[in-house]
Amino acid sequence: MQAKILLAGATGYLGRYLVQALLKQDKGFVALGRSLKKLGAMGLGEAQIKLAQVTDPMSLAGCCDGIDIVISCVGITRQKDGLNYMDVDYQANINLLEEAERSGVKKFIYISAFNAPNYQSVRMLYAKEQFAQRLLSSQMLEPCVIRPNGFFSDIEAFYAMAKAGRAYLFGWGDVKVNPIHGEDLARFCLEAAELSSHQGSQPKDSYLNDSPHKAKQTWRPRQDKRELAIGGPDIFSIKELAQLAFKAMDKPEKLMYLPDWVRKLALAVAKQLPERVGGPAEFFLTVSGQDMVAPAYGEHHLLEHFKSLS
Ligand SMILES: NC(=O)c1ccc[n+]([C@@H]2O[C@H](COP(=O)([O-])OP(=O)(O)OC[C@H]3O[C@@H](n4cnc5c(N)ncnc54)[C@H](OP(=O)(O)O)[C@@H]3O)[C@@H](O)[C@H]2O)c1
């Protein structure tokens, strides 16, 4: 029988691609969110919508009844609810996990972030990792933590700079990253949903890439499938990302190099600011300081994505 999925954080960037993929694959699923307006506009039927507030355990009561797999994309990125990362990325996901454990859910997939365990002084990543560790220690269901690299949605910041006329880079812009498109990541999450910890798995050949900046294929079939790091198919230096944005618009490139001490100083300031103001900057300035190259996956390329924004 087909597994039934509960998707939390369905109204976000990744959540929307997951909903599209689930609809396309005709999977049995329920999308959980707090805004009926947003959920209703996503092409979902009434039976596919569960209205609940993940920060309120009472409102989650019964949401996992009859569910086999929970996928949670819940987390603060740009929301301005006056809540902090421990309230949402940690506690709201705990609320959902406890409800899943109570209801006998078989598997819980959580979307964390690449390298989160290595950056525990970053408040967002600390909250995410606290939850990930609680999930990984669950004895009542099969845990799976997916740690994706930056999403194309975040890399659009380079497009915005290029559109404004100038892109600012730290150091020589030589730090490397392989961002991933939401559609590729959604497909990866659904493949993970199908994996059982007893199965081996290889990426399908069509997902291997042949672009000039091709990432070395580092997916390991014997990788512990409880924790899956993942990035997009192409590796770029930050300078190349900025150049690509100018190229997509057919504009002459204007790059401005800022010494790396500017990043370090801004990071020290961001760490002193309240989370609402300093949290996203603290995350961005930390991960901009060193290479972030995850195992490669996917078919979407950034140049086409930037062009689609024009
Ligand atoms: N963006 C990236 O580059 C990136 C990279 C690696 C990992 N991640 C992680 O991947 C996950 C998904 O990212 P995304 O870009 O899809 O995020 P997103 O677009 O901001 O979506 C986040 C989801 O969480 C929900 N949410 C946030 N605060 C909430 C609250 N107080 N109460 C109830 N629901 C709340 C949002 O609901 P509403 O729509 O109702 O606000 C939304 O459905 C996040 O945990 C993020 O940290 C992101």
Image: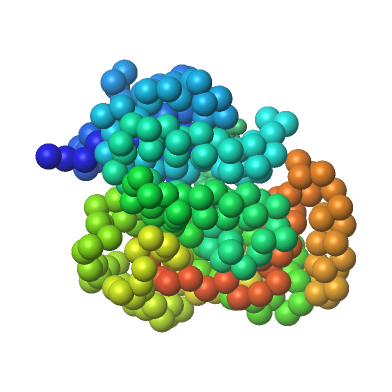
Q: In this rendering, would 281 be left or right of 296?
A: right
Q: Residue at x 82, y 44 (%)?
A: 274
Q: In this rendering, would 280 be left or right of 8?
A: right
The one of 119 and 265 positioned closer to us in this rendering = 119
Above-or-below relation of 248 to 61: below
Q: Quadrant of the N terminus?
A: top left
- Residue 206: x and y in percent read 24, 68
The residue most toward the left is 1
The one of 5 and 218 positioned closer to us in this rendering = 5
Q: Residue at x 34, y 46 (%)?
A: 141
Q: How is the protein colored in the picture?
A: rainbow
- Residue 138: x and y in percent read 42, 49
The one of 151 and 66 positioned closer to us in this rendering = 66
**Ligand 1 placement by image quarter:** top right
Camera sees residue 46 = yes
Above-or-below relation of 49 to 86: above
Number of numbered discs visible in the structure rendering? 0
- Residue 201: x and y in percent read 24, 67
Quarter assignment of residue 209: bottom left
Camera sees residue 309 = no
- Residue 163: x and y in percent read 66, 55
Q: Residue at x 27, y 60 (%)?
A: 197
